[in-house]
Amino acid sequence: MSQTYRSTRSSSPDTISFEEAIIQGLATDGGLFIPPVIPQVSTETLFSQWSKLSFQDLAFEIMKLYISSKEIPHEDLRKLISKSYSTFRSEKVTPVVEKLVEGENINILELFHGPTYAFKDVALQFVGNLFEYFLTRHNAASENKKQITVVGATSGDTGSAAIYGLRGKKDISVFILYPTGRISPIQEQQMTTVEDSNVQTLSVKGTFDNCQDIVKAIFADKEFNTKHNVGAVNSINWARILAQITYYFYSFFQLNSTGSSSKKIKFVVPSGNFGDILAGYFAKKMGLPIEKLIIATNENDILDRFLKSGTYERSDDVKVTLSPAMDILISSNFERLLWYLARENLAADINNKDEEAGKILNGWFTELKTKGKFTVDPKIIKSALVDFDSESVSNAETIETIKSFYEKSSNHYVLDPHTAVGVTVAYKEKAKCNDSQGLEYICLSTAHPAKFADAVNKALSGFTAYSFEKDVLPEELAKLATLPKKLKFIEKADIKLVETAIEEELAKMEL
Ligand SMILES: *Cc1c(COP(=O)(O)O)cnc(C)c1O
């Protein structure tokens, strides 16, 4: 069983523990942590046991394969899981809404029933509790009390999921920078109305890139970093991927609980940093008989171009789209998939396969850094296409899908623009593949439509019966507009100003 971790770029046989992988986040060689061996689950176990479990029990069965009970005793792991999903509004945590359009095989997996109405809650609610668990245990056993100062930048959506994951946690403070006036009102309300004293938002006069540069500079500032133990909960943390594996199994069982081979399932996943769909890859490799994982990208289509050409190449500029949480230049978690593909394609007589794969990855990513691109052997693409397919979607298509789905679905279902990118790809895939009998699509819905009012209203305001306030906006989100805001304004995008603000606020927090 694989319960130790290694870096995707390492050519050494050394491995580290789960706790080290989580607390460290990113490896010192620039690589990402992965379990070199993916645990296997038998068909018998899947369909005579796992298919009957609740979301929480399933999460436990999956996570205990990746975390040694010597690191987290099973009883503690169960408690962490139960606490993390008690904040969700749906009893099923991630329910599937089946067959919204009569006669069509499109199903929607709703991942937005967590506290911030976005799929990132599924992972970040768990990660927050996990950080607190490790810190509390460390501090109980050591004279040397450890506290973590989490610092992050957001262009809107991720900040609130991080804040809600870490609010009120012992020995952790969280500072989120965002560009003043450049995030949506609802996003700002979600972040700034959290009252917990360990949370502080910093509204920085500047762009998102300015905010991100400041965060990078803070991480690079050794003195500040050592003094305050600066940490991150970004999308490359292994615990986030791990927590997301559960909903692939859970939703699969909702549509096919017996493992019947006449009911095939394709997942369509709106993708940016490749964290969400990578969890699906782990589910498939563990033994869940998923027919295909389909990558849906917006106009920032590095993944789609790679699968079609074999060249991984960053574009010069990020395109601003209607699905901003997928506006990326590089898809950070994709590196993890590349490691498994590289390893699987090594010659059979190579002994140290893990180390060899690390060397190959190191070569590719050095090339990416120096030349802005690298090209892989066609056999790598061939193996990727066994599990994956991909398509990209334009803004116009996104709007059109929100509109047409509203028109033809029962109860006028409203898709958020990210989900609409996925649903568009499902229709493209249907047209391309001539669906066989019994095939079902599960489209992952990554955000509640109320979070992206502009795109949704652009698509639907032409329908006379449509009202955003009545049909889309949940009461809980509407109420945020009336609450007091807690934010600190930083009048210039300057690292010193931000560091000073963090130190002032930390002194007041009395962690
Ligand atoms: C983060 C996010 C995505 C992209 O997920 P990745 O794991 O980065 O591929 C898609 N939709 C929404 C709403 C998101 O917040």
Image: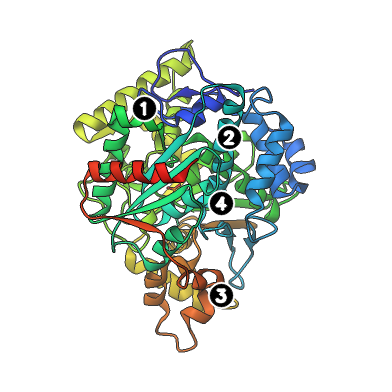
Q: Say which amino acid is labelled 4.
A: Lys
Contact, CB < 8 Å: mark 1 with mark 3?
A: no
Where is mark 1, residue-wise?
226
Where is mark 2, residue-wise?
285
Disc 2 and disc 3: Cα gap in Å?
Answer: 34 Å
Residue 73 vs residue 343, the one in the foreground: 73
Hey, which quadrant is residue 394 in on the image? Answer: bottom left
Is any atom of residue 423 visible in this view? Answer: yes
Where is mark 3, residue-wise?
409
Is any atom of residue 436 visible in this view? Answer: no
Contact, CB < 8 Å: mark 4 with mark 1?
A: no
Colour scheme shown: rainbow
Q: Residue at x 44, y 42 (%)?
A: 235
Disc 1 and disc 3: Cα gap in Å?
Answer: 54 Å
- Precedes in sequence: disc 1 or disc 3: 1
Q: Say which amino acid is labelled 1.
A: Thr
Disc 4 and disc 2: Cα gap in Å?
Answer: 15 Å
Q: Say which amino acid is labelled 2.
A: Lys
Q: Which mark is residue 266?
A: 4
User: Does residue 465 lie above or below 352 as drawn?
Assistant: below
Looking at the image, residue 271 sits to the left or right of residue 476; the answer is left
* Quadrant where the image shows the N terminus: top right
- Precedes in sequence: disc 4 or disc 1: 1
Residue 507 vs residue 207, the one in the foreground: 507
Secondary structure type for disc 4: strand
Q: Say which amino acid is labelled 3.
A: Ser
Disc 4 and disc 1: Cα gap in Å?
Answer: 46 Å
Q: Residue at x 58, y 67 (%)?
A: 104
